[in-house]
Image (tube, rainbow, N blue to C red):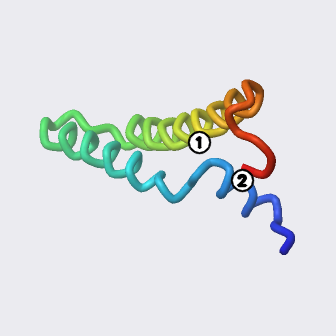
Amino acid sequence: MKLDVVSKWLISTRSAVFVMTAISCIIGGLLVFHSGTFIWTNFAAAFIGLIFAHASNNLINDLVDSKMGIDKDNY
């Protein structure tokens, strides 16, 4: 079965666990909202930034593991 580019990206970044990152960001946003200083643009930037940081961390981790020989073959 051949995967398209989007499917490969979703698998490589382990997107199934982005829910964990999203929930932690939403909890932080709710705390700020409760304090009365919530700004939508800041929240959106933080949310998108955290998701991309999580994805980047997963990709870099796989790259380093592959270069060091920890991940072998088709892992």
Q: Amino acid at mark 1?
A: Ala
Horizontally, residue 46 falls left or right of residue 4, namely left
Horizontally, residue 50 falls left or right of residue 6, namely left
Q: Residue furthest right?
A: 2
Horizontally, residue 36 falls left or right of residue 40, namely left
Q: Nearer the viewer, residue 8 or 71?
A: 71
Q: Is residue 67 above or below residue 43?
A: above
Q: Amino acid at mark 2?
A: Trp
Horizontally, residue 67 falls left or right of residue 40, namely right
What numbered label is drawn on residue 55? 1
Q: Would you name the residue on which mark 2 appears?
A: 9
Residue 57, position in %: x, y? 58, 33
- Which residue is located at x 22 percent, y 46 percent? 30
Q: Residue furthest bottom?
A: 1
Kindly state the secondary structure of the residue where label 1 is placed.
helix
- Which residue is located at x 31 percent, y 44 percent? 24
Residue 3, position in %: x, y? 81, 67
